[in-house]
Image (cartoon, rainbow, N blue to C red):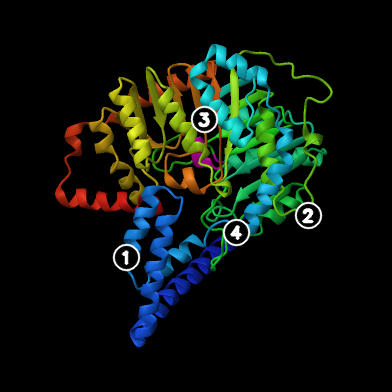
Amino acid sequence: MRKQWFQSLLMRRAVIILILLVEISSFIFLIVAGTTISEVAAIIFRVLSIVVALYVVSKNDKGGYRLIWVFLILMFPIFGGVLYVFINSQMISDRYAKNLDEVIRSTQDQLTIDPALNNELKEKFPVYVKSVEYLENVQKFPVYKNTDTRYLSPGEEFWPVFLEKLKTAEKYIFLEYFTIGEGKFWESVLEILKEKAANGVLVRIMYDDMGCFLTLPSEYPDYLRSLGIECKVFNPFRPFFTTIQNNRDHRKLTSIDGKIAFCGGLNLSDEYVNEKERFGYWKDSAVMLEGEAAWSLTCFFLQIWQINRPQTEDFRQYYPWTDSPCPIKNEGFIQPYNDIPTDHERVSESVYMHMISSAEKYIYISTPYLIIDEDMISALSLAAKSGVDVRIVTPSKYDKWMIHQATRSYYRDLVNAGVHIYEYTPGFMHSKTVVIDDKAAIVGSVNWDYRSLYLHFESAVWMCNTPTVLDVRDDMLKSFEASDEVMKEELNYKRGWSLFRLILRLLAPIL
């Protein structure tokens, strides 16, 4: 079976890559040939580029994104406008976005906001009220108490806990991941899922087709269904002029009976638990919620699962606390949140900006990629100049060379402003965490780059006044100790290298 899957996977890759190469070559040939043969065609393409450039300037996109596109369009007037139209057609279609919006609006009443908790938060932690109310007012994401949280890092710590909790499922297991890869980790998970499905537990798996392009064969959903497991592939990748290539489901979450949930940066593949080495030691993290807040992550899964289905399910059938209240009682505040590209609301970026502005003593950040706009640079710089200890840790070993160099292109401005940048020397830093002042933290799937902040589907958990906040802090401090700090004198690049990184930084919004 594995040999057949491997052959199928290789064939799928080869066919798709071949089709893409043919498409790109044909695209370039038609434009070049057309403009060479006909002066009229050349004029038409130039006029189109001017019109597209004016359109880009008028759009409500981030300044850096508009700047790079205007630059490219005017630099290459023959095909710049056509290139913009082509690439920006690779987004979620209006029909898809409308369907998702309808599902979300029809199910928002399943997430109940408790004004009493807001008032309590105002009394105890007024500095975080704006962030919480933003998520409630704009996206209807409630804040919860009565939830135990557990920080799990690295992946080797996550693995046994994850398996243990999967075994407790009685009614359903929902899994949504960007990448699933065959190996020991996934096999150990799948064994439990098969057993649960055979015993009548509803098991649903949703994975992103682009994220699994190199790891799973196209017939894998049929295999899962043969095991009694429901499966949905998010936005199947097709190497044609499609409308869904740029908006990927980058979330990593699990819900077990609506009582237990996991969220973080860990995918279900061996490298994430260091069973297989890629780019040195893989540093990652997740948070486990047990209690009331797990319900939000359950709803997040169900909303995406319902897209393009003939009828929306009644989410109330999955609510775990109908017959008896949640037995867990504690004083921490938990707010899971979701970020989707179709509503044009920059949720993750806004939450990060709130975190930066509310920091009084320190803010620690871990991210595999650091590709941010001027507003974020200014916010981090202002915090550092105001006496806040701002530290960011990124990988020393990288998975994408150009993205890594683009990340490094931001170091000089930040370091000169007083921000401390570290590179994690044991391997690849894939963890996406933020912690401030021993009071609040975020763990999720959101990278500090354009794709996560503006293009992908993401999820994260904001926490305040929980023991987990200090666990995140302690883990970050260990990461700093295992890292090399980037010093000012290291940033005096040679002229050619500086120019190269400047170009990468200019291109960063479309990398």
> In the drawing, does residue 22 fall left or right of residue 458?
left
Which numbered disc, 1 or 3, marks the residue that appears first in the sequence? 1
Q: At which x and y percent is residue 441?
A: 49, 24
Question: Could you tell me the amino acid type at mark 1?
Answer: Leu
470 and 274: which is toward the camera: 470
Distance Cα–Cα, label 3 vs label 2: 34 Å
Distance Cα–Cα, label 1 vs label 3: 41 Å
225 and 98: which is toward the camera: 98
**Looking at the image, do the residues carrying marks 1 and 3 touch, with CB atoms under 8 Å apart?**
no
Question: Could you tell me the amino acid type at mark 4?
Answer: Ser
Of the numbered discs in the image, which one, if any, rests on residue 93? Answer: 4
Image vertical order of residue 242 relative to residue 429, above or below: below
> In the drawing, does residue 116 fall left or right of residue 313?
left
Is residue 185 part of the magenta span, yes or no? Answer: no
Question: Could you tell me the amino acid type at mark 2?
Answer: Pro
Q: Secondary structure at mark 3?
A: strand
According to the image, label 1 marks what residue?
74
Which numbered disc, 2 or 1, marks the residue that appears first in the sequence? 1
**Looking at the image, do the residues carrying marks 2 and 4 touch, with CB atoms under 8 Å apart?**
no
Which numbered disc, 3 or 2, marks the residue that appears first in the sequence? 2
Tell me where the magenta segment starts and ends, as one range.
267-274
Which numbered disc, 4 or 1, marks the residue that appears first in the sequence? 1
Q: At which x and y percent is residue 374?
A: 34, 41
Question: Could you tell me the amino acid type at mark 3?
Answer: Val
Distance Cα–Cα, label 3 vs label 4: 30 Å
Of the numbered discs in the image, which one, if any, rests on residue 443? Answer: 3
Image vertical order of residue 320 relative to residue 349, above or below: above
Of the numbered discs in the image, which one, if any, rests on residue 406? Answer: none
